[in-house]
Amino acid sequence: MRKIEAHPDAAIFPMMSADDLANLAADIKAHGLVHPIVIGKIEVADGKTKEVIVDGRNRYEACEIAGVEPRFAELNGHDPKAFILSSNIARRHMTAGQRAMAYARIYPTQGTRGRGNKIPKFGEFTGVTSQRVADARLILEWAPDLVDNVQNGSTIISEGVKEAKKRADAASTEEAKLDKLRNAAPDLADLVAEARMKLDEATAAAKERADSLIRQRKLVAEEMARTLDFFVQDNLDAETRAEQIAALFDVTQATAEMKQMSETLALLISHAQRGGTHGE
């Protein structure tokens, strides 16, 4: 018995239970294979094609168990994806949510496939609507861990949509925070991108950095205002005056910006003195 793999999209639908498969094998052994196994071809690497089972995975396994050589039928021009979807939806007991999820998994996006095979319209399958498929695609994108649960019916599609929307909203908020962080503190944003720091931690660090700079600037402004009158009457040169101004705050801890502002203030005082002298 030749070994043939199943079409990837056929694997979306679960196999029979072990007991059901054993019963099918017994029936095939007693009466033969009634319905042939449908095979088709899919493209693989380097433009080559491979033969796969499009419909009849359970029958194929049952034949192997029963020791019966299976019969095969060629798909002959039909779109494998559409055939898999229609044949499984038609004979399985599936909710509207399960049908929509199957459709979305086989056709993640709407459009036209190659070689003239158009994606089937929603209305071609009972219970499959555009909104249901949109919901299923949302789950595929934002909550892929729930896809199998929706497919097997353990999670209803509305619950999956609720969780997917929650994650999408959170991701949108985080992306906005990250964009803001990139503008304010690119180095911290890089740490987040490299998974070396959490976004909330980096945001807090950036805020503390910004607050510290504001405090430093406020300190400089206050010291400048407080010392202006004290020094304006002195007959000191600008360099000496800058040193005395800087000494009012711990110059060893001062930022380059604070030192520059001290020097600028000293020059302003000198200009003010000269202006005052000319005015007398």
Image: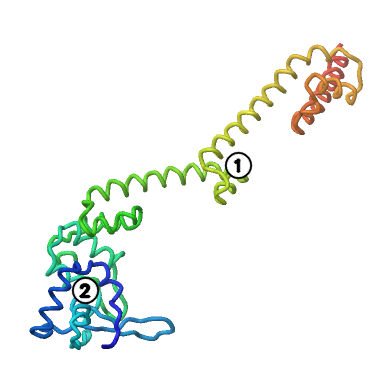
Q: Is residue 135 above or below residue 73?
A: above
Residue under the image location 60 percent in, 45 percent down: 186
Kindly identify which numbered label has been placed on residue 185.
Answer: 1
Hey, which residue is sitting farthest left in the picture?
31
Residues at marks 2 and 1 touching, judged by CB atoms closer than 8 Å? no
Q: Residues within 10 Å of mark 2 (few under 14, many from 20)?
A: many
Badge 2 is on which residue?
84
Residue 39 screen position, x and y as percent? 24, 83
Quadrant in the picture for residue 76: bottom left
Residue 207 screen position, x and y as percent? 57, 33
Q: Is residue 245 above or below residue 116?
A: above
Disc 2 versus disc 1: nearer the observer: 2
Residue 222 screen position, x and y as percent? 70, 18
Here the colouring is rainbow
How far apart are the alpha carbons under marks 2 and 1?
Answer: 52 Å
Sequence-wise, the earlier of marks 2 and 1 is 2
Q: Which is more toward the observer, 3 or 35? A: 3
Q: Is residue 133 left or right of residue 50?
A: left
Residue under the image location 41 percent in, 47 percent down: 171
Q: Amino acid at mark 1?
A: Ala
Residue 250 screen position, x and y as percent? 79, 23
- Tag 1's secondary structure? loop
Quadrant in the picture for residue 121: bottom left
Kindly identify which numbered label has been placed on residue 260.
Answer: none
Q: Amino acid at mark 2?
A: Ile
Total labels: the figure holds 2
- Tag 2's secondary structure? helix
Quarter of the rendering occupied by the N terminus? bottom left
Q: Is residue 145 above or below residue 221?
A: below
Quarter of the rendering occupied by the C terminus? top right
Residue under the image location 30 percent in, 73 percent down: 8
Q: Residues within 10 Å of mark 1 (few under 14, many from 20)?
A: some
